[in-house]
Amino acid sequence: LFQQIRKFKSNFSKIKAVNAAELKSIAKKHKDQPLFSVPATFANSFSYSVLNIFINGLFGSVVLAYYSMSYRMLGIPLSLISVSTSKAFFEKAAREYDSTGCFKKTFVQTSLFLVALAIPMTILLMLLAPWAFEVFFGKGWGVSGEYVRYLAPMFGVRLVVSTLTPSMIICGKQRIELIFQTLFIVCSCAAYILGKYMESVKLFLLTVTVLFAIVYIMYYLYMLKLSLKKRRNEND
């Protein structure tokens, strides 16, 4: 916050000099940000939240309690790693994009860093989660650890992809971002429909993992393509 205040003070005269016409022009240029990025964020949250309703309807409140615990624990790496790394990636990639017209170097470096974290983390979760849940939360919570085994691969992919999503803002592809995020809602609904024919919650979670992972991989490949593509001139 103090760093931002210092930058604000040093640039206050420039900010004050901006007139209404410039504000209107910038708002028009970046209108996709409120029109599409906000709904995309909502769609992403909804696609995971609605799974709680589906699991409760299909398998009952006890299973939902175990799933909720596994989801909360899997969300910790996302909070600790993804959010902070995403901000750093956004700034560095935007600077590279402004200077070179693409941001492939930053994208590849960040991807390798995230993959190097995600792979061992996913393996450890799949191997140790049931035991760790029993130790830290008490007898019986190993069931949540079993659920983690089925969800961990998808969350590993999510860790990588969600960190790199500022790529869509850098390239002005918020509309495409909304499409991808909507696909996650479609996947949740598809898993629910298939879940009606499954007697095992583990099969349901495996279905969620596979469907979501497919969308995440498509999402990543699209962002990789964006990072490699040279920016067109604004007059093109």
Image: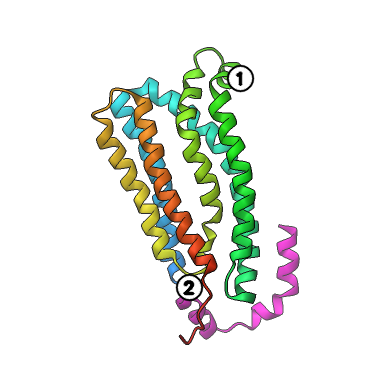
Residue 94 image point, x, y percent? 61, 68
Name the foreground residue: 24 vs 71.
71
Q: Amino acid at mark 1?
A: Phe
Q: The C terminus appears in which quarter of the rendering? A: bottom left
> Is 74 left or right of 81, judged from the image as shown?
left
Looking at the image, tell me whether mark 2 or mark 1 is earlier in sequence order: 2
Q: Which mark is residue 30?
A: 2
Determine the secondary structure under disc 1. helix
Identify the residue shown where x is 47% and y is 77%.
29
Q: Amino acid at mark 2?
A: His
Q: How is the image coloured?
A: rainbow
Residue 64 image point, x, y percent? 39, 26
Can you say whether 145 is above or below 77 in the image? above
Residue 158 image point, x, y percent? 50, 45
Can you say whether 172 is above or below 181 in the image? below
| Residue 52 appears in the rendering | yes
The stretch drawn in magenta includes residue 17: yes
Q: Residues within 10 Å of mark 1 (few under 14, many from 20)?
A: few
Q: Which residues are magenta?
A: 1-30
Can you say whether 72 is above or below 41 in the image? above
User: Which residue was labeled with disc 1?
Assistant: 136
